[in-house]
Amino acid sequence: MYVIAGIAVAYSHYNLKLPYTISATLYPFLGKKALGTGGTIVDILCIFGIAGGMAAVLGEGVLQIGSGMEYIFGIETGVFLWSILVVVITAAYIISSYTGLKKGIRFLADQNAKVFLFLLIFVFVAGPTTFILNLGVQGTGAFLSGLPERFLWTSPMEGSEWPRWWPIFHWSIWLAYAPIIGMFLARLAYGRTIREFVLFNLLLPAGFGMLWFWVFGGASIFYDWQGEGQLWEMISNEEGGLELSLFVFLESLPFTVIISILMLVSIFISFTTLADSLTTTVSSLTTKGYSIDHPEPPATMKVYWGVLLGTLALLTITAGTGGEITGIEAVKQMATVAGFPILFFIIFQTAATLKSVIKGN
């Protein structure tokens, strides 16, 4: 989704010399209408999507960090702690975004990559290495052979909530982000070929993602198996168990406290890095004058959007407190609502980009 949106924005801006907007990618179908009122409506729709998606994913991060702090340090999680975490994360990504792409965002991304690599290697070496490799190979085969079935699984007879709440939830988040992430990736793509763009933004990240699931997924399944399903029972039944399960899993590894704190730091940096890049990109979309020579939007717009997105995230996870919809459920509903309308735009955008690239104009 991100690569499709990124190619669309990069091709329309760098090759066709169109404005640096999401709506400009529809120029092959709409012509000049894509640059007028119709285009403005499309951009607003995408801003709505990114605001909802941002609130959802930031809310999920706050819930997990809060659960981890309660588990490690004994700090009670709840609205008060969530509010503090949102303020701290918001301040961090506003400062990072304020310093610009080549300073704050790049520095955080570099540090986060190093932390992720260390965690990956540590769990692989300290965990059940042989089991991880065996299950990884088997799991990859099962994934490839069962992919079409899983794509189309709706569970009409069993009535499982899984297809509705988890695949759709994650796809909705990715869809909500796609247009804005595409704009951000396009900023980094100047001078690259489409082949290079696909390699570094699709194939390599997907390969790392598969390796990550091999290691962390394999280790967690092994420890859950040895613990007679205690980890899965926590995820399924205990309130807040989903966010807490990561830190319960880390108890099975050596240096538990140190690794758990490092994991908290990596989660914090991950959401800060994502949020500052999105804040910068939304600010670019809502201002004029972007160019290769002047890639940074006004600092005041970064602060405005940073505060607004952080506030929306806090409202998402706290508005239902004491009612039927709380925590992760509110996050999932926000993501689904935000991502759904973007689905139709992405389909239209993809067709427009293919038409433009094939014709070479």
Image (cartoon, rainbow, N blue to C red):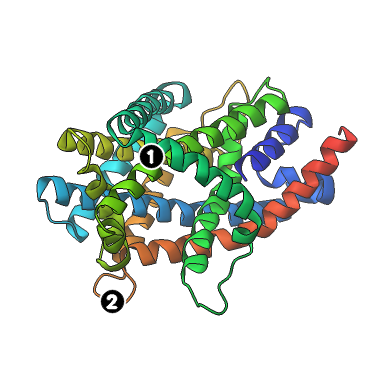
Q: Is residue 261 visible?
A: yes
Q: Position of residue 29 (x, y in %)?
A: 83, 50
Identify the secondary structure beneath mark 1. Answer: helix
**Element at label 2:** loop
Amino acid, disc 2: Gly
Q: Residues within 10 Å of mark 1 (few under 14, many from 20)?
A: some
Whether residue 331 sits left or right of residue 86 in the image: it is right
In the image, 181 versus 150, the foreground residue is: 150
Residue under numbered circle 2: 323
Taking the image as shown, residue 148 lies to the left or right of residue 129, namely right
Compared to residue 130, the image places residue 82 above or below, namely below
Residue designated by label 1: 131
Amino acid type at mark 1: Phe
Residue at the image point whose x is 68% and y is 52% from the top: 346
In the rendered image, which quarter is residue 288 located in?
top right
Labels 1, 2: front one: 1
Q: Residue at x 76, y 30 (%)?
A: 17
Q: Is residue 275 above or below residue 38?
A: above
User: Residue 51: horizontal and vertical position, in percent?
Assistant: 47, 53
**Looking at this view, is 299 or 65 the one in front?**
65
Residue shown at the point (71%, 27%) measured from the top left = 195
Say if residue 47 shows up in the picture: no
Label 2 crowding class (10 Å Cα cut-off): few <14, some 14-19, many 20+? Answer: few
| Spatial CA span between label 1 and label 2 | 43 Å
**273 shown above or below 338:** above
In the picture, residue 2 is in which quadrant?
top right
Q: Residue at x 30, y 35 (%)?
A: 127
Give the percent coordinates (x, y) of residue 209. Answer: 49, 38
> x, y percentage for residue 102?
46, 21
Which residue is farthest left?
74
Q: Quadrant of residue 315?
A: bottom left
